[in-house]
Image (spheres, grey):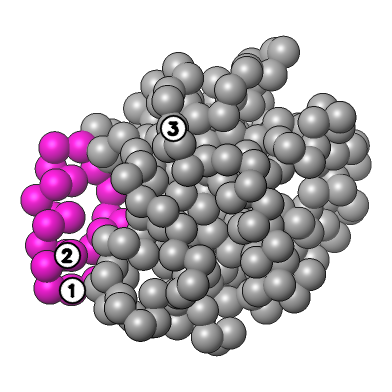
Amino acid sequence: MKAVVITGASSGIGFEIARLLSKNYLVIGIGRSKTNCKNAKDAILNENPDAKIVYFIADLIQQNEVNRVADEIIAYLESSNNSKLYALVNNAGCVRSWYTTSEEGYEQQFSLNHLAGFLLTYRLLPLIIKAEGRIIMTGSQSHKGIKMHWDDVMLRKKYNPLTAYKQSKLCNILFARGLNDRLGNTGVKAYVVDPGLVKTDIGNKQTGGIVNLIWSIRKKHGVSPKVPAKTYEFLIEKHPAPPGLYYCLCKEKAYSRQVTSENADRLFVLSRKLCGI
């Protein structure tokens, strides 16, 4: 049976992707809260008692947690007869109002929104290559209109939460570009999904002040997470693999001119260093 790993799978977009894909795949969800993961699993099984779904708990902001859960998932797949890891959905993300860091000293939006997916992909990549599978990042239109702050990627000198978020979303698409540059002969394809404005709580978790207020107002105009979940399903199930890199509502979309192989290569070198690879 084909397996799919989904991060941030206990709520919002990640939960809806897990719900959709659990009809045809073994879904391996990752979430930070044991209670939320249990509730998500129960909800999916109540709707579809035959669903094959399991959750692992990890705080992916911390790299030791990424490595631990990667070890657990690899061991789980090895013990599951004929389960091939066909897709990885790097969906977990955060917004922060203030400059906060991971245990490694990395700004948390950069750490979770980019480095966690980079490291988890690195750990699981041999299995995905074996299945000639797909890797999908949750991106955002906000990656446009910004450049990488190569001289201070953590924005330690002048922190702005929106700048940090936008840069992390640019990292998502640069990472996908870099993967496609490197994996072109393996059958593996990487994509970024722009979910659009979605009614989730991402901007209300561990935030405050103006960030919390603005997101509380904006999300009222967002679509249900069920809407973007269909694009992830499309990119995973479509054969042959869809062309292109950046998708919204199951259609290719134009992306920033900053998304070049040169910038992708530079981000790869930096990310490998920051992840101790």
Q: Quadrant of residue 184?
A: top right
Vertical position of residue 10 compared to residue 188: above or below:
below
Please state the horizontal and vertical placement of residue 20, each as a whole percent of the image.
Answer: 51, 30
Counting from the top left corner in percent of width and height, residue 70 is at 74, 63
**Kind of residue sitting beneath label 2:** Asn
Where residue 22 sits, quadrant-wise, is top right
Which residue is tagged 1? 208
| Residue position marked by numbered label 3 in the rendering | 255
Vertical placement of residue 86 versus 110, above or below: above
In-front residue for pair 80/132: 132
Q: Is residue 173 left or right of residue 85?
A: left
Query: Do labels 2 and 1 touch, CB within 8 Å?
Result: yes
Quarter of the image with the C terminus is bottom right
- Which one is closest to the eye, mark 2 or mark 3? 3
Q: Nearer the viewer, residue 178 or 251?
A: 178
Q: Nearer the viewer, mark 3 or mark 1?
A: 3
| Region in magenta | 199-222
Q: Residue at x 18, y 73 (%)?
A: 208
Q: Residue 173, percent across and down?
A: 53, 43
Q: CA distance from mark 2 to mark 1?
A: 5 Å
Query: Is residue 124 a member of the stretch shown in magenta?
Result: no
Q: Tag 2's secondary structure?
A: helix
Q: Is residue 85 above or below residue 24?
A: below
Upstream in the sequence, badge 2 or badge 3? 2
From the image, give the main secondary structure of the stretch colored magenta: helix
Q: Is residue 210 left or right of residue 80?
A: left
